[in-house]
Amino acid sequence: MTSFFKLQVDLDDLTDAMYDFVTDPQPSRNHRPVILELNDFNHDLVDVLECMVLDGTEDREDVAGFVHAVFAPRGPVPRMMES
């Protein structure tokens, strides 16, 4: 089965926006556009970012790893061939 939809994500911009959220000490961080969009897309992603805030994440690489794991393109799924 082929994929009908493709999600296009600017990984660098998303990483920057998520990192800014994670390192912002103000409660107003919850009103950032990235959080509003992620809440519409999948609220569980915001939960992970909130855990990063509580854990004291300070390294952009940690946020980049999360973004890559969730949004990076993956190759096509191999099709099972019958012999």
Image (cartoon, helix red, strand yellow):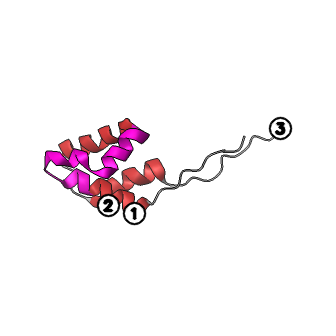
Q: Which amino acid does label 2 sit on?
A: Asp
User: Residue 19, located in which quarter of the rendered image?
Assistant: bottom left
The residue at which mark 1 appears reads as 12
Task: Name the main secondary structure of what is drawn in magenta.
Answer: helix
Instruction: Indicate the position of residue 65 as horizontal and vertical percent values.
Output: 38, 54
Which numbered disc, 1 or 3, marks the residue that appears first in the sequence?
1
In the figure, is residue 8 to the left or right of 52?
A: right
Q: State the residue in front, 7 or 73.
A: 7
Indicate the secondary structure of the residue bearing disc 2. Answer: helix
Indicate the secondary structure of the residue bearing disc 1. Answer: helix
Is residue 62 visible in the rendered structure shown here? no
Q: Residues within 10 Å of mark 1 (few under 14, many from 20)?
A: few
- Which residue is the extreme one toward the bottom? 12
Of badges 1 and 3, nearer the viewer stands 1
Question: Dots 2 and 1: beta carbons under 8 Å?
Answer: yes
Instruction: Indicate the position of residue 27 as horizontal and vertical percent values.
Output: 15, 45
Up the image or down, 41 lies above or below 33; here it is above
Q: Distance between the residues labelled 2 and 3?
A: 45 Å
User: Residue visible at 30% across and 38% down?
Assistant: 47
In the figure, is residue 44 to the left or right of 27?
A: right
- The quadrant in which the C terminus is found is top right
Q: Distance between the residues labelled 2 and 1?
A: 6 Å
The residue at which mark 3 appears reads as 82
Is residue 27 visible in the rendered structure shown here? yes
Indicate the secondary structure of the residue bearing disc 3. Answer: loop
- The quadrant in which the N terminus is found is top right
Q: Magenta span has 41?
A: yes
Q: What residue type is labelled 3?
A: Glu
Stretch in magenta:
20-42
User: Residue visible at 37% across and 44% down?
Assistant: 38
Q: How far apart are marks 1 and 3 (CA)?
A: 41 Å
The residue at which mark 2 appears reads as 16
